[in-house]
Image (spheres, grey):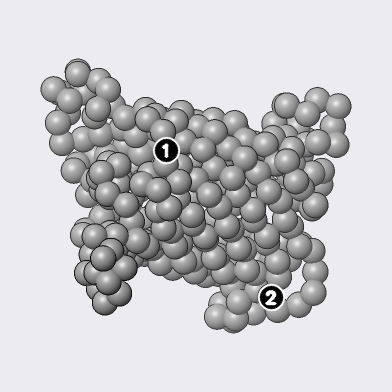
Amino acid sequence: MEQPGEEEREAEETLFGGYFLTAAFVSNPTFAARPDNTGLVALRHMLHLETDLYKQYLTLYTDQNFFSDRREGWIKLTEWDGTYALTGLVDRFGWRIQYERDAPVDRSGVKQAYADALVTVRYQAGRESVWWKTTLPDQNLIAYAGPGWLFQNSNYFARPDNTGRALFRYVAHADLDLYRNRAVLYADVNMFTDREKGNKVSPTEVDWIVGLALRWHNYELSFYREEDRPVDRSSLVQKYFAIQLRLAFDVPKRIGSRLNPFAAANTR
């Protein structure tokens, strides 16, 4: 999701920032708690950390995602997904190079890993539409979409039932700001293709999320629904409904330099 104050990042670099979130899957008939599709997720915990290497043009970030199994007491962690990436924004274009590894933590089993590259184009109605700025000055629409390529894929599947190997991905995202970034309706679509099929560009899986986020200062409470389903055959559909609390934080480099007692000496 878009972060509050995203536009201001173009004028100032971040020393480090990110967010911590925790979510409860209050209804989960089929969303698995491990990469081998065993168990059912109960809780999700995630830490996102990022630092600007050069303004908004080059940012390093990591996501650490942890899941627990409702069939095994809700608390004990069963899966750890680690993501490491370089990303950036140039005008309305975004890019990302990412490595992800999903692995069980309570037993041996299937591990999924890949590296990909992604390019997106971005639209902001509050900046680019005179009609929108005049008619809806307290609201905004931010959207982006683009293609990606899993250029290295040791075992990342092309469908929710763990068949095929993903090759291309197509992403789309939209945030509809209902009122001054305090209430936001959002949606995500993520599609994959199968490198083992003859038609390597046609989607074999579509994952979608629709949610409502309520924001207050650095806090966000959201309610959302996700469904991951195959599109070229009938098989497993993974879906759930969750409630999530997120706390965001950001330390700009100008503040970090004041906190560093060696900063002044290093500039002499």
Task: State the image coordinates of residue 60 (x, y, percent, origin top left).
Answer: 48, 54
Q: Which residue is located at x 75 percent, y 46 percent?
A: 152
Q: Secondary structure at mark 2?
A: loop
Q: Which residue is located at x 57 percent, y 69 percent?
A: 66
Which corner quadrant of the image does residue 72 belong to? bottom right
Give the side of residue 97 with respect to residue 132, left or right: right
Task: State the image coordinates of residue 44 (x, y, percent, origin top left).
Answer: 52, 67
Give the side of residue 161 with respect to residue 181, left or right: right
Whichever of labels 2 and 1 marks the residue nearer the N terminus, that label is: 1
Q: Which mark is residue 44?
A: none
Q: Is residue 100 above or below residue 94?
A: below
Q: Secondary structure at mark 1?
A: strand
Q: Is residue 54 above or below residue 120?
A: below
Q: Residue furthest front?
A: 268
Q: Which residue is located at x 73 percent, y 41 percent?
A: 151
Disc 1 crowd, CA 10 A, few/some/many (<14, 14-19, 20+):
some
> Mark 2 or mark 1: which is in front?
1
Q: Read off the residue under disc 2.
A: 105
Q: Is residue 189 visible?
A: no
Task: State the image coordinates of residue 200 (x, y, percent, origin top left).
Answer: 78, 29
Closer to the camera, 37 or 96? 96
- Quarter holding the C terminus is bottom left
Which corner quadrant of the image does residue 134 belong to? top left
Task: State the image coordinates of residue 27 (x, y, percent, origin top left).
Answer: 52, 61
| Kind of residue at disc 1 | Leu
Q: Which residue is located at x 74 percent, y 50 percent?
A: 156
Q: Which mark is residue 89?
A: 1
Q: Is residue 177 above or below residue 79?
A: above
Mark 2 touching mark 1, by CB under 8 A?
no
| Kind of residue at disc 2 | Val
